[in-house]
Image: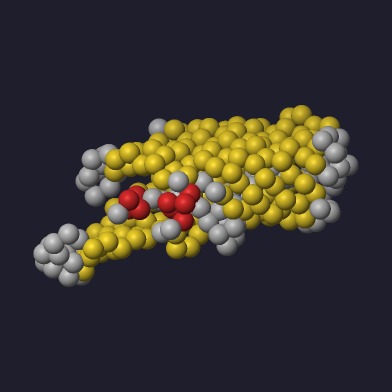
Amino acid sequence: MKAWFVGIPLGLASLGSAMAADAVVPVSPAAYSMEQEGWQFTIAPYFWVAGLDGKMAQFGSAEVEVHESFSDIIKDFDIGFMSIAEARRGNFSIFNDLQYSQVSTDSVTPRGFVAGSVAVTSTTFSGLLGAGYTVAKSQDGHLDLAAGVRVWSVDTDITFYGGLLDGRSFSDGDTWADGLVGIRGNFNFTPKLYLTGWGLIGAGQADLDWDVAAALGYHFNERFSSVLGYRALGVDFSNDDGFVFDIIQHGPIVGLVVHF
């Protein structure tokens, strides 16, 4: 039951492909113009082909090393989404990054005396709300200083069927929040091709929380663009009850960006 502790925000449906990711861009990929007035909005769902590495512990167990590839995770994937949105006016911006995934697995126990089978469902949510201010800009792009708060919620439910524990269910998990600071930027190589990326790091209830990404984008027109890049996100959290969620998610990301 290796999926017991898997809570990777991978997603689909708008997992933003859902797995999309910081919608693939906590940075508006549209060409930056100093003459723009009023609010500009960006919504980006995306798909994150991410693997998972780290250490986890739940239900009073000892810490276990976790090394899951994307193909390992997708086999137990139920539902999820990922998307990012940004509202920008002049030098100021407000953005969010939402990720949700649910994975589940069933396993038959060896002898069936204590339980005939076990069902495990793990859900992971993370939501980042932040604000940025442009400290450098030109007709080719901009660089923002950013700060925000990310909320994490990880829960695992285990249910036994048959045997002595038939119908019994147990849950373990936690919810926590971390403050993050960093940079977000966008640079246009041509009117069609641009580079976007971000780097955020912080802590709070977690010992460490960080997120970095870089991607190339292509404008189809003023309304739509696509993004292809690589993202890595890590968090190191534990509580006094023995719950440990010390993981790094990393992999290619692809998304569709809508500007209006």
Residue positioned 27% across, 39% down in the render = 63
Residue 39 in sight from this viewpoint: no
Residue extending furthest toward the right: 35
Q: Quadrant of residue 212?
A: top right
Residue extending furthest toward the top: 136
Q: Nearer the viewer, residue 27 or 10?
A: 10
Left or right: 201 as drawn, with respect to 45? left
Left or right: 135 as drawn, with respect to 11? right
Residue 143: give x, y in percent of width and height.
72, 32
Left or right: 87 as drawn, with respect to 8? right
Q: Quadrant of residue 28?
A: top right
Residue 198: give x, y in percent of width and height.
63, 36
| In this view, 7 is above or below 158 | above
Left or right: 254 as drawn, with respect to 74? right
Residue positioned 37% across, 60% down in the render = 104
Q: Quadrant of the C terminus?
A: bottom right
Residue 88: give x, y in percent of width and height.
74, 46
| In this view, 101 is above or below 134 | below
Residue 5 in sight from this viewpoint: yes
Residue 125: give x, y in percent of width and height.
46, 53
Residue positioned 71% across, 53% down in the render = 257
Residue positioned 65% across, 37% down in the render = 214
Q: Quadrant of the N terminus?
A: bottom left
